[in-house]
Image (spheres, rainbow, N blue to C red):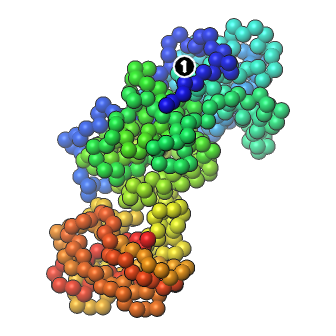
Amino acid sequence: MRSKLSVSRVFPTGGTLLGSLFVLSLGCGGLASDTVAGSVAGPDAPIPAAQAVPAGEAATEAPRLGDAIREAALRFSVPADLLTAIAQIETGLVFLPGLDGDAFEGQPAYGVMALRGERLARGAELSGQSVAAVKTDPRANIQAAAALLRAAADGEQGLTAAPIEGWAAAVARFSDLTREDARADYAKDVYATLQRGLPDEVNRRHDLRLSPRPELGAALPSTPGGLDIRSAYYSGAKWKPAPNSNFTNGRSAAIDVLVLHTCAGAWSGCWGWLTTPYPTNPYKTSAHYVVKEDGSEIYALVDETDTAHHVGKPWLGASTNARSVGIEHAGTSYQGSNVWQAGQMAASLKLSCDIVKRQRIIQDRNHVIGHYQPDPVNRASDPGTAFPWASYMRDLATCVGGGGGGGGGIIIDSNQANNGPKARVATPSANWVSSTNVAGYWGTGYYVAQTAAVSDAAVFEFQLDAGGEREVFAWWTAASDRSQTTPFVIFDAAGNRLATVNKDQTTNGSRWVSLGRYRFAAGWNQVAVSRWTTPGDVVVADAIRVE
């Protein structure tokens, strides 16, 4: 049973910042149009590339901000340190140019304060500046945010002269988030930033003066940590359930896709919006998980057994939502100088590794995808035009196949770059051709060769620290030209042949197929995919798993 949070004792409410509700759906969204269109690319079609960013449109690090922040603080009688901490929380001091593909339900963010939509217009009005200036000029952008903070603080007697500890309620209202617990979480993050301060090199670069203030530790606003996770499977997450309006009970298809997203906004706004019910959230958006900017927290919003509403377009001819798990990442898109923090990337990889192992998701770029792939027009920068896909997939393969977390045994991929320290594959002879022609392969591709009465195998090796019984599985892509008697020859570390197992590779593709259980010795054992069988077909060497 979910408990209802009341934060009135921590943050007195008494009115919202704007006259109209700020309803911007952080994240990507997608329910209504998640049907198969008539012109969907087939499984052999290339992955759509993220659209090129026009010159001057990439997010850039803002110029020295100290003077602009102090000027705005003085004009609107708000603490300069608060403005600095808010800018750090919102954008990491990166000036956002308002990319359409990085928008929050169609409303892109601008400047170091990430202003958008009605809130941007209201800030421009309160600060006496044009909307265009607030979008493009750092000083105008900061002035608009300072005016919004001033408006959030008005009505509290003596707040102008109050110590910074007394501004928590105003900061919560400044966030303009719809959920009280999300506003509380936002204020907590701002005050945690004040407590930590900024690194010396960042202060020097921007002429800022945000030094650590450890005495603020006692003043950090309190927020709930989330309920203990129940059905959602990842043990490293806290359960923060989305309302029933924002997901569909159950699944209409088996899970075979993992989708990475950027929230296009800060942590508290991201999970707060995705857990806001319809009709306040008119898009009914959600995701299964949200990862905080520094990786310190992960919230599970939707059980993996249910269908989250996070992608509005089909992928490879079928509904994306029905067969995918969605991970949102707090912050803005990975592009330009906006490189995601190492902690967030590490937490994302650990979560993705866990999901891929449990759900048996194929490790290729048709099954581990960014939101831009099914929706390259509206989500071109999601998760980011510079997202490091090559290293992410390599590290994911290492985790899944190299013992980077329980449950997956040892996986030996046909691409040695994807293998961990206890798995290896030698490059086979030139008779074996590397291919990605048939979708559904493990990792980044597979080897294929013509059958013939020759000793010319593709050899997969795995190391065991101690001998014992293990089950062996094989993965291949099925097609009509495959051999129906592909030989898998199994050896122990002493070179003893334990068995030869023939499998029909015209069927049972893109899944782990058991080759049986065998007693192996300590050391490097082998599974060889042989060509020596009935001529006229091809055999596939893709991946081997040992458990």
- Residue 121 percent coordinates (x, y): 53, 17
Which residue is drawn at the image coordinates 23% and 41% (left, top)? 36
What percent of the width, then of the height, locates residue 111? Answer: 59, 30
Residue shown at 26% from the left, 91% from the top: 454
Q: Is residue 250 above or below residue 506?
A: above
The residue identified by callout 1 is 119
Q: Which sits in the foreground, 470 or 401?
A: 470
In this view, the residue in front, 19 or 223, is: 223
**Furthest-right residue in this view:** 215
Q: Position of residue 170 (x, y in %)?
A: 68, 18
Vertical order, 455 against 251 (above or below):
below
Left/right placement of residue 72 relative to residue 462 reads right
Q: In the current view of this chain or complex, which residue is farthest to the front?
A: 1
Question: What residue sits 46% from the left and 91% below the top?
Answer: 494
The answer to which quarter of the image holds residue 60 is top right
Secondary element under disc 1, as helix, strand or loop, is: helix
> Is any atom of residue 2 visible in this view?
yes
Across and down, in percent, residue 105 comes to 43, 29
Q: Quadrant of the C terminus?
A: bottom left
Name the residue located 38 percent from the left edge and 34 percent from the top edge.
247
Instruction: Give neighbour class at mark 1: few <14, some 14-19, many 20+ (Cα, 10 Å).
Output: many
Residue 51's quadrant in the figure?
A: top left
Q: Is residue 418 above or below residue 520?
A: above
User: Can residue 431 be seen here?
Assistant: no
